[in-house]
Image (cartoon, grey):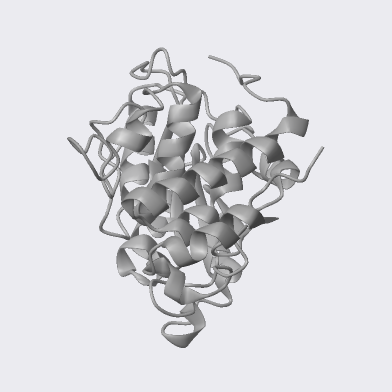
Amino acid sequence: MTRSDVSAPHSLPRVANHLRNQVLELCYRHGGHASTAFSCVEILVALYHGGILRVDPSAPEDLDRDRFLLSKGHGETILYAVLADLGFFPEDWLWTHYRSGDHRLGGHVDHQTPGIETTSGALGHGLGLACGLTLAARMDGQARRHVVLMGDAECSEGSVWEAALFAAQWGLGRLTAIVDRNHIGSLDHTRNYLALEPFAAKWEAFGWEVVPVDGHDLTALDKALSPRGEAEGKPRLVLAETVKGKGCRMMENDPIWHVRPVTDDVIAQCREDLTWTGP
């Protein structure tokens, strides 16, 4: 498999806007965490629609595929929207099986869903899983990459830093961790319950290559996430500065939207905010 040309670079912002609209409608109909999903839309679009990940919807079990792990399990709606858009499963599952029907698409991702590598929900576990998978692939002589997306709030958990030490110890150069640095946890700003700064310096001190990036800039994300010479060496930490609730003004940077539902009194304003205005 090679990097695909699923979407031309100039069309990726349109793809991102389309997927934000789908997330909004999904959360309106069935619940979910809209603001959490909105902060990482461009990250997933860059990985999947930008062709950074070597994955094939027609062969989701290909042993040579790259692995993506969603550690921030509350962002499931955008991952479902991306996978459906690329054909990993029928798009109508979004409307008939997300948190409804036979629940093929649950409130957190499950490895039994096509395109989903690991079940997630409890935070702080994704990086450790990715470390094990990356080391196992090396031992098996396989060259696939492993990419894990974490929330910044889950980096308050000790298991994250144990895994960070492990990755550096074993020189897991084919491992990329992305931190969705939106500065908000479930109910408050991260600075108010466990300060993370100097965040980048901490990862560097643990032996990681740190790449700061605007998490909503698709061009910058492509550069930060693209493959490099990764057989050995430092694991990479892409520190993506984002806005929680990006795209809907009433949600942006407001912690309450992690738990507040998208209801009739807000849907019209959010739909207006997400109307495509680009070329």
In this view of the protein, can residue 11 be seen by the observer?
yes
x then y, percent, for residue 22: 50, 42
x then y, percent, for residue 162: 34, 61
Q: Residue at x 67, y 48 (%)?
A: 275
Q: Residue at x 31, y 41 (%)?
A: 132
Viewer-side residue, 192 vs 228: 192
Residue furthest bottom as drawn: 192
Question: Compared with residue 87, is residue 160 higher up or lower down, i.e. above or below?
Answer: below
Q: Residue at x 49, y 28 (%)?
A: 85
The reply, left or right, for residue 71 in relation to residue 39 is left
Residue furthest right as drawn: 279
The reply, left or right, for residue 42 in relation to residue 55 is right
Residue furthest left as drawn: 102
The reply, left or right, for residue 123 in relation to residue 142 is left
x then y, percent, for residue 91: 41, 27
Viewer-side residue, 34 vs 45: 34
Total numbered labels: 0
Viewer-side residue, 240 vs 127: 240
Name the quadrant of the C terminus.
Answer: top right
x then y, percent, for residue 90: 37, 23
Q: Residue at x 39, y 69 (%)?
A: 260
